[in-house]
Image: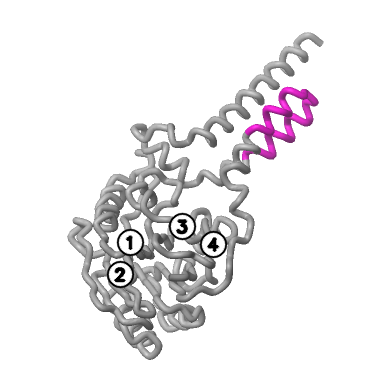
Amino acid sequence: MRRTSTVARIFSGILIACSLLLAAMLLAHRFIPNRWYNLGSLIETFLPWFGLLIPPLVILAAIRRKPLAIVIALLPALVWLKLFGGIFSDKSDGPGTFRVLAHNVNADNSETAATAESLLAAESDVIALVEVTDEQLAAYDELLSDRYEHSAAYGTVAIWSTHPITESEEIDLQLGWTRALRAQIDVDGEPVAFYVAHLLSVRVSSEGFTSDQRNQTANLLGEAIADEEIDRVVLLGDLNGTVQDRSLAPITYQLRSAQATAGEGFGFTWPADHPLARIDQILYRGLDATDSEVLDATASDHLPVQADFDL
């Protein structure tokens, strides 16, 4: 009997310790260091999914019927709700002055016609595509040009617009090939600076969360946006990271997420079959986001995203 009581106390102690550890990690994830395998960024990338650990802790605490264990098991739930509870409310105000769409179409995507048809159905004013091959670019340009009179393309990124593109240029991310561009578009006579970017991919391996090159491209893109003279800015593309990842701070500290301010839910975009993270972003400043959505899957491994804005 004494042995059973001792085991029960140990189990309760482990349960309480796990609950406190999870609550602390959720509350203070910014303080988890990156110097060990980029652990902090890895945790922040999948931070919402740590909520799945909460129900087992609460259930086990309830089975133990220990009031202290139950109360402490609820702490991570309260922290998680503080972080993400507001995400589930619908913050949309409906259509705006103009609509934008961003999509990583996947270099291996051979269904360009079907993909273009899906994008056209969204009736966006601006479409930004990344990971576009030269062959795909020619096909998309032919398929989209009837509706979108204005376009610009550099390397593997491209943008189409129903509004005039008054200037455009590539952004040097020091990779040896172009994965970012800037275009000035006059929307109803008002200049808006559009950035289209595809930051380098990250890998999870025995060496940890390898993101150094991605982080370098984020710094360079952040510098370009910081130097932007136009007040209204929209960033579209695949950043290969979530807005929670502190390594994208050079970008996310300057811009707001359309999904966070005008969407509903997490808006996960990758992988398309079973989305686990939102790495395809629409970020902005100097505008009012009125709506944000994740669109139906194409033949890509990413889901398209769109947002509406008022000037």
Q: Which residue is mark 2?
A: 157
Name the disc covering residue 165, or none: none
Pointer 3: what residue? 257
Mark number for residue 198? 1
Sequence-earlier tag: 2 or 1: 2
| Amino acid found under the numbered disc labelled 1 | His
- Which of label 3 and label 1 is nearer to you? 3
Magenta segment: 53-75
**Residue 22 location, x and y as percent?**
57, 32
User: Is residue 55 one of those drawn in magenta?
Assistant: yes
**167 versus 74 height, above or below:** below
Residue depicted at x 52% and y 66%:
292
Specify the quadrant of the image occupied by residue 164: bottom left
Contact (Cβ within 8 Å) of mark 3 with mark 1 = no
Q: CA distance from mark 2 to mark 1?
A: 7 Å
- In the visual, does 94 lie left or right of 195? right
Q: Nearer the viewer, residue 309 or 25?
A: 309
Q: Are marks 2 and 1 in contact (CB under 8 Å)?
A: yes
Q: Earlier in the sequence, mark 3 or mark 2?
A: 2
Under mark 2, the amino acid is Val
Is 260 on the left or on the right of 251, as rendered? Answer: right
CA distance separating discs 1 and 4: 23 Å
Q: Nearer the viewer, mark 3 or mark 2?
A: 3
Mark number displayed over residue 262: 4
Q: Earlier in the sequence, mark 2 or mark 4?
A: 2
- Give me the C-alpha separation between circle 4 and circle 3: 8 Å
